[in-house]
Amino acid sequence: MPAANIQTARDVFKSMDKDGNGTIDKEEYVQALRKLHIPKAMAELVTDSVFAKFDTNKDAGIDEKEFLKYFASDENIAIHNRIARSVFEEKFLLFFGIYLIVVGFVLTTNTKLATENIFNLEGTVNGPA
């Protein structure tokens, strides 16, 4: 697997390992699939199948080594790319939401300043000088 794909796989692994213990448990895997709008029952079935095949040491978790082996299979790259995009979208939406809150606060606390900044009206309220 190319180095860029390995890094992508590691990033996806870290995003799925919510508690940071170095292992993705079944609940974390189900939650990642749910972010892709996969129904819970289907996500649980897929998770059971993935764990049966790739949890090679049968410790009820997929560690990074197991995940990289799983991720490298062509059939699984597409779904993990969707998970990576989902994580990016989630972070973007959070950032954008915070931005909108700040803009909204500025608009409600200083309407004249906000209007001047948005429409670049400074000095044009009374017409040109």
Image (cartoon, rainbow, N blue to C red):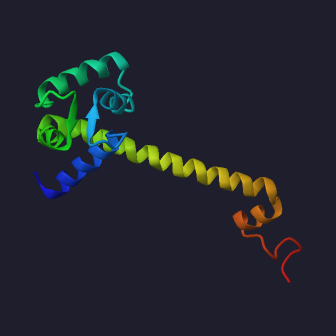
Q: Residue furthest bottom?
A: 129
**Image coords of residue 52 (percent x, y):** 15, 23
Above or below: residue 106 compared with residue 93:
below
Q: Which residue is painted at 79% across and 65% down in the image?
A: 113
Numbered marks: total: 0
Name of the residue lying farthest toward the right = 126
Classify residue 68 by image quadrant.
top left
Q: Nearer the viewer, residue 90 or 128?
A: 90
- Residue drawn at the location 24% of the way across and 51% of the way down: 8
**Vertically, is 107 above or below 39?**
below
- Residue plotted at (25% across, 39% down): 80
Residue 70 relative to residue 22: left or right:
left
Question: Residue at 45% of width from left, 43% of height from top?
Answer: 90
Q: Percent position (x, y) of residue 116?
A: 76, 67
The x, y position of residue 102, in whole percent, is: 67, 55
Residue 24 is left or right of residue 92, and the answer is left
Quadrant assignment, res 60: top left
Vertical position of residue 87 compared to residue 27: above or below: below
Quadrant containing the C terminus is bottom right
Please tell me which residue lies in front, 64 or 106.
Answer: 64
Q: Name which quarter of the figure residue 17 lies in.
A: top left
Q: Hey, which residue is sitting farthest top in the picture?
A: 41
Q: Residue 106 at x, y = what percent?
A: 74, 58
- Image side of residue 128 versus residue 96, left or right: right
9 relative to 21 in the view: left or right: left
